[in-house]
Image (tube, rainbow, N blue to C red):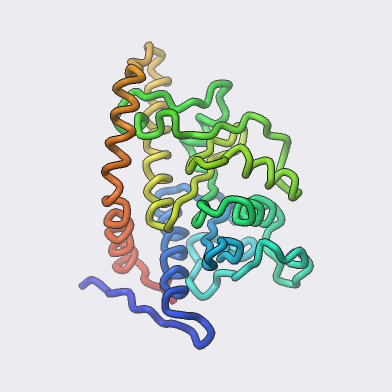
């Protein structure tokens, strides 16, 4: 029997914010489901204020499979004392997510992970997602590529640099590092990340054959990418369907 996730707003949390917590917690659990997570590293965040500067993020060194809605930290990108708190978030998370939320209002939800295939592609001298099928074509001319990795992001300057590289895009391949996607909602960002890893898997498998890639023409690739943009209503449905799977498997994410 399917367990229906019920909202349980805390006394200090609005129903709207609680639903945002539930959705973000679901994204963490789904990252484990798809093997996108890495130890107790990587971070997801979600803006809850109109200006995007107040945001939810996972606490320091908590495994994605244990994260619940009530565990998420509420942070302020303009609060310079955040890292002085006894429960301070991971330094790299604060530098990346804090600066992106401070500088890019369109980045409401920010998902940063090191999934196997996308990270493998990001480790190539040419990490471009070439349009060889329908999924890879979704990202044609729509990805920011960061090829200036200089170590872990542990300064505001590095977070600001990454925000500049991402700009108004929603997807960033981080050379020698991993990937970062943003969206207006958790559902939107999750869908982008799902198809990004699928696209990278297809490309890595195609490379592994040693044969020449059958790359689409720019015209067909652009046409396909635009058709994906018209297909955007599926994003919310995709995420809702995945939450139903979580509700059966382990609904504790919504606590």
Left or right: 95 with respect to 200?
Answer: right
Residue 192, percent from left and from top: 40, 45
Residue extending furthest toward the bottom: 11
Residue extending furthest toward the top: 212
Residue 232, percent from left and from top: 30, 47
Residue extending furthest toward the front: 51
Question: In the picture, residue 198 is in which quadrant?
Answer: top left
Classify the position of the N terminus by image quarter.
bottom left
Is 65 located above or below residue 158 in the figure? below
- Residue drawn at point x = 57 percent, y = 64 percent: 55
Left or right: 166 with respect to 31?
Answer: right
- Residue drawn at point x = 48 percent, y = 43 percent: 170
Left or right: 211 with respect to 146?
Answer: left
Question: In the picture, residue 147 is in which quadrant?
Answer: top right
Is 76 located above or below residue 108 in the figure? below
Residue 91, percent from left and from top: 71, 56
- Residue drawn at point x = 35 percent, y = 34 percent: 138
Residue 202, percent from left and from top: 36, 30
Classify the position of the C terminus by image quarter.
bottom left
């Amino acid at each position: 029997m399917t367990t229906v996730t019920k909202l349980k707003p805390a006394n200090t949390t609005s129903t709207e914010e609680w639903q945002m917590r539930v959705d973000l917690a679901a994204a963490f659990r789904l990252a484990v489901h798809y093997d996108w997570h890495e130890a107790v590293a990587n971070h997801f965040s979600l803006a809850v204020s109109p200006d995007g500067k107040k945001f939810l993020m996972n606490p320091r060194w908590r495994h994605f499979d244990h994260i619940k809605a009530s565990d998420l930290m509420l942070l302020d990108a303009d609060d310079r004392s955040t890292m002085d708190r006894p429960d301070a978030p991971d330094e790299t998370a604060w530098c990346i997510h804090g600066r992106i939320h401070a500088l890019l209002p369109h980045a409401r939800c920010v998902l940063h992970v090191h999934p196997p295939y996308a990270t493998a592609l990001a480790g190539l001298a040419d990490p471009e997602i070439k349009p060889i099928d329908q999924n890879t074509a979704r990202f044609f001319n729509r990805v920011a590529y960061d090829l200036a990795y200089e170590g872990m992001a542990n300064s505001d300057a590095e977070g600001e640099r990454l925000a500049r590289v991402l700009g108004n895009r929603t997807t960033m391949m981080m050379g020698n590092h991993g990937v970062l996607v943003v969206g207006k909602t958790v559902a939107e960002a999750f869908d982008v990340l799902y198809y990004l890893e699928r696209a990278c898997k297809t490309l890595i498998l195609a490379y592994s054959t040693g044969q020449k890639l059958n790359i689409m023409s720019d015209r067909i690739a652009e046409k396909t990418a635009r058709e994906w943009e018209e297909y955007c209503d599926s994003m919310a449905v995709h995420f809702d369907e995945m939450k139903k799977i979580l509700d059966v498997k382990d609904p504790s994410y919504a606590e």
